[in-house]
Amino acid sequence: MKITDIKELEKIANEIRTGIIEQVYNGKSGHPGGALSCADILTVLYFNQMNIDSKEPNDEQRDRFVLSKGHASPALYATLAKRGYFDEKELVGFRGINSILQGHPDMKNIPGVDMSTGSLGQGLSCANGMALSSKLNKQGFRVYCLVGDGEIEEGQIWEAAMSAVHYKLDNLCLIVDNNNLQIDGTIEEVMNSKPIDKKLESFGFNTINVDGHNIEELINAFNNAKLEKGRPTAIICKTIKGKGVSFMENQVGWHGKAPNEEQYKQAIAELKEGI
């Protein structure tokens, strides 16, 4: 299934955002801000770009996705449910003791999850291994890894970046969710990693800067990444933390807390206006 209609993809992204709010509200905990900021990215990957089949979640030839910023799991879960990997009714059990949908992705119990994540900084290393395996075994699948701009303060990210270039992993695409906020404030205040694109270029990456909420720009960037040979691509996506919910947008306080009933109703109403 490949959806090319921009309006339809925008609608799906908004429905995924609604799913994010439903999960965090019902679970009474979670990380809505950074989940909302990457909804468009995941929409394009799962509904336009990746070679996947929800009926064959373990197909060896499938493209892989690693959510390195694992606390943004509500975005991944809402996307997987929308894509048909499991029933959307599962979303209301988010973080429940008997739910498959725990706070961080679990590859053993959640259909469609390719890597268990949560410890920040480790996802790109895992993605490198997958991409290298694809090349060595001549399988041809691509690997996508989404990291946060706060997460890239972890040193392992840069070791992995060096390795990705060394092994010429042109089937690897690193995606940076550049919403400029992390748990303790702006990335400039905590540990300034700018300019992100120039740093990755210096390591040898092909880098592309896009508006992370512009579906068309995202599609073009991912298509261009597929054409790049001999080196990995990094797509730096300028995004808004809490995108789609007015009182959450660009508010660091919404990094990791659940809305109350009044806030939940307002958020759902705003998102449904967009649908």
Image: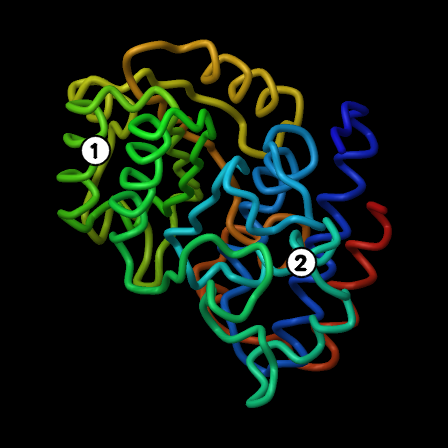
**Which element carries disc 1, helix, strand or loop?**
helix
Badge 1 is on which residue? 161
Q: Is residue 193 left or right of residue 104?
A: left
Badge 2 is on which residue? 78
Q: Is residue 124 left or right of residue 237?
A: left
Q: Position of residue 204 (x, y in %)?
A: 20, 17
Q: Position of residue 69 (x, y in %)?
A: 39, 54
Q: Is residue 272 left or right of residue 158?
A: right
Q: Nearest the camera: 262 or 20?
A: 20
Disc nearer the start of the sequence (1/2):
2
Splitting the image into 4 quarters, where does residue 89 fall? Answer: bottom right
Q: Amino acid at mark 1?
A: Ala
Q: Residues within 10 Å of mark 2 (few under 14, many from 20)?
A: many
Residue 258: assigned label: none
Q: Amino acid at mark 2?
A: Ala
Q: Nearest the camera: 178 or 61?
A: 61
Q: Residue at x 28, y 32 (%)?
A: 132
Q: Position of residue 270 (x, y in %)?
A: 79, 56
Q: Quadrant of the N terminus?
A: top right
In the rendered structure, are the residues bearing label 1 and label 2 in contact, judged by CB atoms less than 8 Å apart? no
